[in-house]
Amino acid sequence: MCRIAGIINSKNSLEKVSEQVKAMCDSMQHGGPDDHGIYQAERESICLGNRRLAILDLSSSGHQPMVSHKEDIVITYNGEIYNYKQIRTELINLGYIFKTQTDTEVILYAYQHWREAAFGKLDGIFAFCIFDKRQQCIYLVRDQNGIKPLYYHFDKETLTFASEVKAFKHAGIYQENSNWRIYYLAFGHIPEPYTTIKDVCSLGKGSFLKYNIRNAKHFVQSYHEFEHTAHIRNEDYAVEQIREQLSNSIRQQMISDVDIAVLFSGGLDSSIITILANQFDSKKLSCISANFNEIDFSEQKQRSGLLQKIDAHKIERLITYRDFVQNFETVLSSMDQPTNDGINTWFVCKAAKENGIKVVLSGLGADELFGGYPSFDRIHKIQNLNWLSKSVLRSMRFSNNTKFKRLYYLSLNSPIGEYLCLRGVYSPDVIADLLDIDMKTVIDCLEEIPIQPGIKKTSNETRASWFEFNMYMQNQLLKDTDFMSMSHGVEVRVPFLDINFVKLVLSISNEIKFSYEQKKKLLVEAYKEDLPIETWKRSKMGFTFPFQEWMRKNSDIADSSRYSNKRAKSLMQNFGDNKLHWSSALALYRTYHAS
């Protein structure tokens, strides 16, 4: 696991470019504290950089950027390839000789042998750059689920890339994207492919960018797309396959040369991960949990039932309001992009680092795949409003009820409106007031966001799952998890998002996958015999901190006099009266106090 950066075909001297790439990498040192390296190719005007977090093969042989035996292929890589041993064996049988035990070298020779077809053979979490001297081309590649980030920028034939958006300022790229505040106030995050910097874009998941050095042309191409096949209709068979495939996923993701822990909230998803990981850990598994003085948010009792069933090392971190205040600005500075989530991940990964743990497993992805969110119920309700005219929907902006105001989004000429009706932070009229712009600017900006057009024609359940998986999880949860964990030099692995497990779940019909009586029904059926009854029978709580109380007590956030905008001032007064959710208040704070 690493942080990567590079500049190709710059008009600056190679010495200047090397200084820029080094500065980009140094700005991401938190994500790669163990080693650093720079590769230069003067003839092609290429400079690649790497900051390493050593997980596999902790020796110096894992140094990056890594060069092939014949010095004709170079890679700088961020991630973990879970099936690298199988691919390595296949390549050895084909005559390849390996000098290291790293998965980095496996990618190098997999590309040498299979070219672009190699990308689809990789099962893991990854983002990397390959420089092919013979073909005189550069590849940027991102994993099938977009778990690891990769951003790029083109200017006058110069390609610049990095693992974090903040790194680009060290390459002199910092012009602000004028629309980022619109995105943020609507979504609570900035949706791909956009960022806070103009023309710095996120490479799409399951895609590669190919740059031809000879003519400075490039294109982006998808190498993997998941399909909803829904051919499994027998519940018993589906349960059997879930158990088998999730076990395979966790077995692969337990491969590491450092200790592994589980982020254990006590909910269904993390409990399943904990039970399975405990079976495959030859040493004592560590379980990292957060506790609070606020009793309504502490799940200590719920966790105790499961911990009695396994032999695990408990790491319980008490997080107080004082911790929140003391670390708040540090947490915000750790955000690569403004977001309304991720603060909880920052604190638990801090606890992991303090206990010498570099790798943790997370239950992220289960809610999106199995229907754990309220949106799976709400989407039916908003579909019943389709008969309303656009003028009626637009009139909802005058309502005093926040949920009714969001109905305005259903009048948008894009499926994005349905998602924002389900999960949006502020309605278009409020955003316009907050930013002192007209509503048409807001609407035009949101309607231009690229989204799969065919999604409107799918069933309600499929559409809700698609929105949660490809919008909420992709643009918020995964990005937040990555930069909050890597700010502590901690790698988060997500077994529910193993590509083979995702393929399996997408092959199960909605009729047996989703239930309105029992959330995540198939997961419950698969593991209820392994878990305490209180784990799967209680209502979903989520990985929740007492942010409503903490932020209302924090005058830096909640003091309405700190906001000059009239609408913002009024909203923060509502927050002080407990009439506004903390995430909406945080969005205001970040909008007006962005660093």
Image (spheres, grey):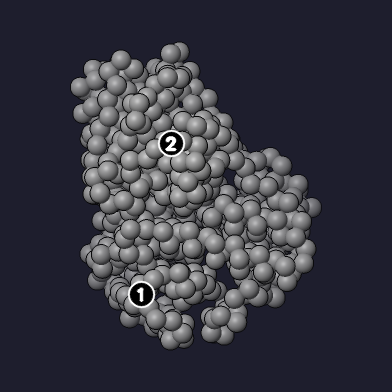
Give the labeled residue for mark 2: 96
The C terminus lies in which quarter of the figure?
top left
Q: Earlier in the sequence, mark 1 or mark 2?
A: 2
Question: Could you say where residue 420 lies in the image, as x and y percent from the top left?
Answer: 59, 51
CA gap, disc 1 and disc 2? 37 Å
Q: Secondary structure at mark 1?
A: loop
Give the amino acid at mark 2. Tyr
Q: 571 or 534: which is nearer to us?
A: 534
Tag 1: residue type? Answer: Lys
Residue under the point 36% across and 65% down:
260
Where residue 503 appears, x then y in whole percent? 64, 53
Residue at screen point 56% across, 64% down:
246
Q: Nearer the viewer, mark 1 or mark 2?
A: 2
Provide residue 268's location: percent of width, then percent of height.
Answer: 53, 74
Q: In this rendering, does residue 127 appear at all?
A: no
Q: Quadrant of residue 514?
A: bottom right
As drawn, 138 above or below 56: above
State how many labels appear: 2
553 up-or-down from 478: above or below: below
Q: Looking at the image, which is closer to me, 248 or 264?
A: 248
Residue 109 appearing in the image = yes
The residue shown at (61%, 60%) is 369
Name which residue lies at 76% across and 56% down. 231
Residue 181 point in image, percent of width and height: 43, 43
Residue 388 position (above or below residue 286):
above
Labels 1 & 2 near each other (Cβ < 8 A): no
